Amino acid sequence: MKLISFVIPCYNSSSYMSKAIESILVGGSDVEIIIVNDGSTDDTLKIARSYEEKYPKIVRVIDKENGGHGSGVNAGLKVAQGKYFKVVDSDDWVDEDALKQAIKTLKKQDVDLLVVNYVYEKDGCSKEMDYLGILPEKEIFTWDMVGKFKVSQYLLMHSVIYRTKLLKDIHLSLPEHTFYVDNIFVYYPLPYIKTMYYLNVPFYRYFIGRTDQSVNEKVMISRVDQQIKITKIMIDLFDPYSFSNPKLQHYLVHSLDMMMTISTIFLKLANTKESKEKIKDLWAYLKKKNKKVFQHIRLAKLTRMPRFIAIPGYRLARKVFKFN
């Protein structure tokens, strides 16, 4: 049995996918790399097959019709044989030393979730995001032992390595032909997590710089309806206050707060009559679905601020954390 299944969803990724694949090959026989060709029209499939032929005991290729990032993750999860499951986007890569440490850790620690650091790679600069002071180090912990996340800190797809069986047991399935599904991937399994371990290493290298990237500001404005869709799906998944653990409750609400903030900010950036109506509609949706969560989040700073304050706040955060 492989230790970690790495799934790399690829769509027209021929010019950069090799870096992602090569960085994971360092894991040797402890890893399997599942390359999902999501209906590419370039040489993505050819490159994937070449790796499969060269590393038949490590690399597997799935060739499917285009269904979007979520569809690629679903396809990879369906066939994953590793004890743990990790998604790596085709334009990103993993730190080789950190990967070796993660493998060593997962051989010793039997947990539902391993949390690692991720690094924004933008304009030749690196910005590492960690969880120091929030997650205990060098011990298995539960939600009771988790501290309070700061405004800028979240568990992202980049930082989580889930137990594969857990994802399959809860029937995780992401929406197809939809952007920003990584938020659901992280959020949905959290109430089912019993044990966690935090490894303070710069594991995931998150590249930011392509103009067509989903996190590019102009792209996010144009796809804000997709962001709204994902936010509503997350609101509908479950009531955070239905869970007895207050730390879990807090983090789930924290996540929804982030989603509402992102949707609201990009609607403010669009600055049209239609976008202003969509802000009202989104907040009305949350209020109708979960009034308690609505009341908690509505007290939050940025989303209640007028545009002339909210936008500079977003710009400052973007400059500091380099998230798009």
Image: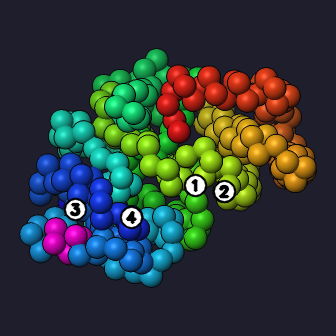
Q: Where does label 3 land, which residue? A: 32
Q: Residues within 10 Å of mark 3 (few under 14, many from 20)?
A: many
Say which residue appears at 28% left-offset and 44% top-offset: 94
Mark found first going from the N terminus, 3 or 1: 3
Mark found first going from the N terminus, 2 or 4: 4
Q: Main secondary structure of the magenta part?
A: helix
Q: Which residues are magenta?
A: 47-51
Q: Label 2: state its secondary structure.
A: loop
The mark lying in front, picked from 4 and 3, is 4
Which quadrant: the N terminus? Answer: bottom left
**Residue 146 at x, y = what percent?**
51, 27
Say which residue appears at 90% left-offset and 49% top-offset: 273
Mark found first going from the N terminus, 1 or 4: 4
Amino acid type, label 1: Tyr
Say which residue appears at 82% left-offset and 31% top-offset: 307
Quadrant in the rendering for residue 104: top left
Q: Label 3: state its secondary structure.
A: strand
Contact check, label 2 and label 1, Cβ < 8 Å: yes
- Residue 217 relative to residue 233: left or right: left
| Residue furthest to the left | 54
Amino acid type, label 3: Glu
Label ID, residue 9? 4
Amino acid type, label 4: Pro
Q: Where does label 1 land, which residue? A: 180
Label 2 – label 4 distance at C-alpha: 20 Å
Q: Label 4: state its secondary structure.
A: strand
Mark found first going from the N terminus, 3 or 2: 3
Q: Where does label 2 land, which residue? A: 223
